[in-house]
Amino acid sequence: MKDKKTKAIHEQIDRSHNREHSTPVYLTSSFTFEDAEQARALFADEIEGNIYSRFTNPNVSELISKLVVLENTEDGFAFASGMAAVFASFGALLRSGDHILCSRSLFGSTHQILTKILPNWNISHSFVDPERPDKWEEAIRENTKMFFIETPSNPGLDIADLEMAGKLKQKYKFILNVDNTFCTPLLQNPADYGADLITHSATKFLDGQGRVMGGLVVGKKETIAEIRFFARQTGPSLSPFNAWVLSKSMETLSVRMECHCKNAHILAKSLEGHPALESVRYPFLSSHPQYKLAKKQMKQGGGIITFIIKDGYERAAKFMNYLQLASLTANLGDTRTIVTHPASTTHSKLTEKERNRVGIFPGLLRISVGLEDIDDIKTDVLQALGKSA
C-alpha cells in the first residue's frame, strides 16, 4: 500500500481469535500478565505491551498509528482533548528559565496557557507575527527552547511559513511544534519541513461529526518519549471508546476533507464583494494576503472561512440569529456548518488590544463549512446577511 489514505483505512491492530473485521472497543482499565516475568519486563520497558489504559490501550494505539502514517512521523501519544495535547507538548519539554517563541495568532486557550499558566513556572514567551517571517529571527533568544505555530491560525487564517520555521529550527536547534488542526495531515505535513512535533485537536476534523473529544501529538520518537513519560505520570489519557470512534473517523477523513474544502472555497468566492462585508478571508482566495504561501504548503484551502461584517457585533449578532441551517456553537470541523463569533466566545478571555492585534474584531465571524449541499449553505448565509441589514 503506497497511498496514505489507503493506509489510514487499513492501519489496524491485530485481529483477535474472533476474526473481527472492525476493531472492537477495549473497554478495560487494565490488562493481565501471562506470568510474573512478563509483568516485570513490561514495567521495565524491556518489551512492549498493554499494562493499564492510562498508559496504553489497543484502541488508542491504533489511532496513533493512523496519524503517524498520515503525518510522516515516527511515534505519538493521544490525549483526552486537544488542549491536553497542546499543554503536554509544553509541559513535558519546557523547564524553568526556558523561552517559547509563538506565532501571535493562536487559539484562545493556547494563548491563556502561554500568558497565564507558564509564567508561573518561570517559562517566558514572545509573540511574532505569522505574516512577518523576516522578523522571527530577531525574537529568538539564547534560552529559546521551542517555536510553536498554528497555521492556518484560529480564527484569523494567518499562514505561517513552515519552510522558514524549519530553517530557523535547524540553525538554532529549538523544538519546532506545529498545530495542524485546521489542515489535518491530508492538506499539510509540517514534518516535511522539519517539525519535531505536530499537535492536533482530534475533536475537530479528525472526528468530523461533533461526537467525541480527543487530542494527539505525533513526532520524532525521542521527543515523544518525553511526552509519553509526562502523560503517563499526569494522566491526561484518551478513553478507549473515544479512541475507537476517532480511529473509525480517520477512515473517512479524505472524502470529508475533499467536500469541506470544495464547499468552503465556493462559499468564500460567493461572499467576496458582498455589500454587507468588509472583507472575506480564505487561504485559497487570491485576495488572501498569503495566498502564494498557502498554495505552496497546503494541498487545498481547508474547511474554514472568516469574514468581517460591517457595523460590528450588533450586526454580527443579528446575522447569527437569522441563520436557519447553520449551527451556533464553539466547535468546528463538523459535518454540519457552524458559525462562531470568536470575540465573544472562543477568544473572549483575550483583552480587546490582544484581539485587535490578531484581527479578531467585533464583526469577525468564523464559519466551519459543513458537508451539506453547497447551495443550501449559500442560501442560508446569504439570507441571514440580507436580513441583518
Image (tube, rainbow, N blue to C red):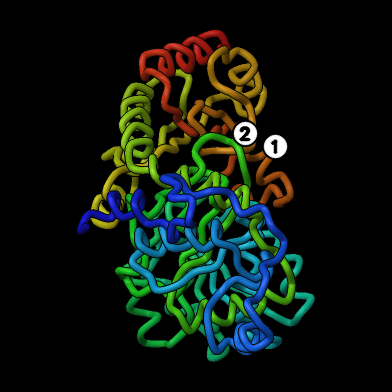
Left of 114 or right of it: where is 376?
Answer: left
Q: Residue at position x 35%, y 53% from top?
A: 8
Near-viewer residue (353 or 343): 343
Of 143 and 79, the residue lying toward us: 79
What residue is pinned by disc 1?
344
Kindly identify the residue that appears in the image at 47 percent across and 35 percent down. 306
Q: Which of 141 and 82 is in front in this view?
A: 82
Q: Are marks 1 and 2 in contact (CB under 8 Å)?
A: yes
Residue appearing at x 58%, y 86% in the figure: 45
Residue plotted at (79% across, 76% down): 120
Circle number at residue 341: 2
Q: Position of residue 378 (x, y in %)?
A: 41, 17
Q: What residue type is labelled 2?
A: His
Say which element carries label 2.
Answer: loop
- As displayed, is residue 228 above or below residue 351? below
Residue 235, image x, y percentages: 73, 68
